[in-house]
Image (cartoon, coloured by chain):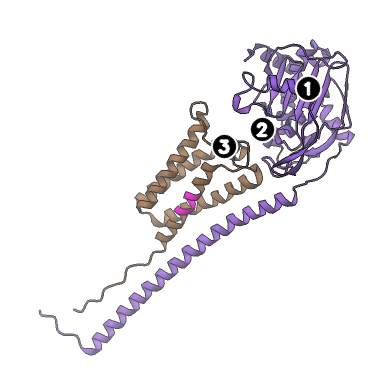
Amino acid sequence: MAWQLGLGVLGLLISAYLVATHYFAEQVPLACSTGGVVDCEQVTMSAESMVGPVPVAVLGLVWFGVTLALVLGRATRPQMVWAALGLLAVFYLVYAELFLIGALCLWCTAIHLIVVVLFLMSLWEATAPAPAADYRVT
Amino acid sequence: MRARTPTRREERLAQGRGRVTRRQQEEAAARQRRIVLVAGTIVVVVVLALAVARFVQSNAATAGAPNSPAPPSLVTQVAGVDAATFDQVGRGSVTVLPTPVRGEIQRGPSGLPLVTYVGAEYCPFCAGERWSLVAALGRFGTFSGLQLSHSATDDVYPNTPTFSFVGSTYTSQYVELSPVELQTNVRSGSSYSALQTPTPAQTSLLQTYDGPPYVPAQSAGSIPFIDIGGQYIVSGASYDVGVLRGMNADQIASALSDPASAQAKAILGGANALTAAICTATGDTPTDVCGQAAVKSLQATLAAAPVP
């Protein structure tokens, strides 16, 4: 659980940073290279970085917030389902980076990796075997 | 009551139940490991498959389709957009307006105000901006010999359809065009193969205006670079080139007839901004173009902007 909390907090912080760079671009510059294949600005300002009027970074922030709540609440199965949804989103975002935008964002990649690891950890928790029953003679 | 000693049969039964329980636990643990291993493998395979597919696509299309003559009908769709459509679009979705420099009037060999364009065929932002430039200049004159091209297949906004000014001619009573495409869209080592060499005048404008204080230092030297009669400059794309993604040249040209389309708002909005700047250089001629509402409105906006 400690690892899940740690990764969740890390993901939350990175998402918060990306949200800040979106809404306060002048005050909070995006620390990343530009102009090549790794171009965070290109990715975070692309059409694919928005879901309607909502930046994907905000959705990520919400996702990590819910994840932390589920971890703290030890809601194992809901956490696994929630993580699976996050994983599907990661697959789409990676596809968008590679095929639609043609650039990669290191911060986004870090979040993607965290989501994948959290998914696998939640799957591990959800499939954990019950402890062996003790036999007592009475 | 004192617990009695279990019989041998009861002991064997007890041991049997314990072994089944532990075996079930071991089987469950093994299943847990298998499930997570399979899931992890699936994740890795999916991501690797995406990466490999992207790599194969990039390599297979490294040369991309060669340039071809732009059909006259397509050029007409872009360079002959009607005034009403331009006015309905207005500024459209343009995010960056031309920057005032208000320097010495740049004139071409015929003495007319000179529009200088510096770009490259690989450049996706140049690919987007050329649509606006062709639409804008189409209001002042006519193009011949335009080529259909596309941006690099392995850069951002890959394979964006566009024109190329290489080998083209522009004729107008009001303005002259001096274009240069520095590189092709074909990979050569870590860059793209050289195409045209800028003239000393083009290089001078690039060095003078494509940097501080007119362009932020981190973007100095960016292309596309457009100088409009020495009065305004454009560095980079005026709009989000992503609106052209997934479309071919015919689709983009057709979309310009609908002022509500994302492509029209971007391209014609950019064209209106360029037109406003060109009108300033030409002394508001021709009047039927420079007198249009959208152009006048943008001219006022541009005139109010201070020189950096």
Badge 1: few (under 14), some or many (20 or more) residues near its Cα, within 10 Å? few
Q: Amino acid at mark 1?
A: Pro
Which kind of residue does numbered mark 3 sit on? Ser
Using the image, tell me which numbered label, if any, was put on residue B200.
1
Q: Nearer the viewer, mark 1 or mark 3?
A: 1
What is the quadrant of the C terminus of chain B in the image? Answer: top right
Q: Which chain is home to disc 3?
A: A
User: Start and end of the magenta stretch?
Assistant: A113-118
Work out whether mark 1 precedes mark 2 in sequence or the reverse, and give the earlier one.
1
According to the picture, the residue beneath numbered tag 3 turns out to be A33
**Which chain wears purple?**
B
Chain A color in figure = brown
Between A102 and A121, which is closer to the camera in this rendering? Answer: A102
Neighbours of disc 3 within 10 Å: few (<14), some (14-19), many (20+): few
Q: Residue under label 2, please give it.
A: B240
* Separation of residues labelled 1 and 3 (CA atoms): 32 Å
Residues at discs 1 and 3 in contact (Cβ within 8 Å): no
Query: On screen, B289 above or below A66?
Result: above
Residue A129 is situated, as x and y percent measured from the top left of the image, at 37, 67
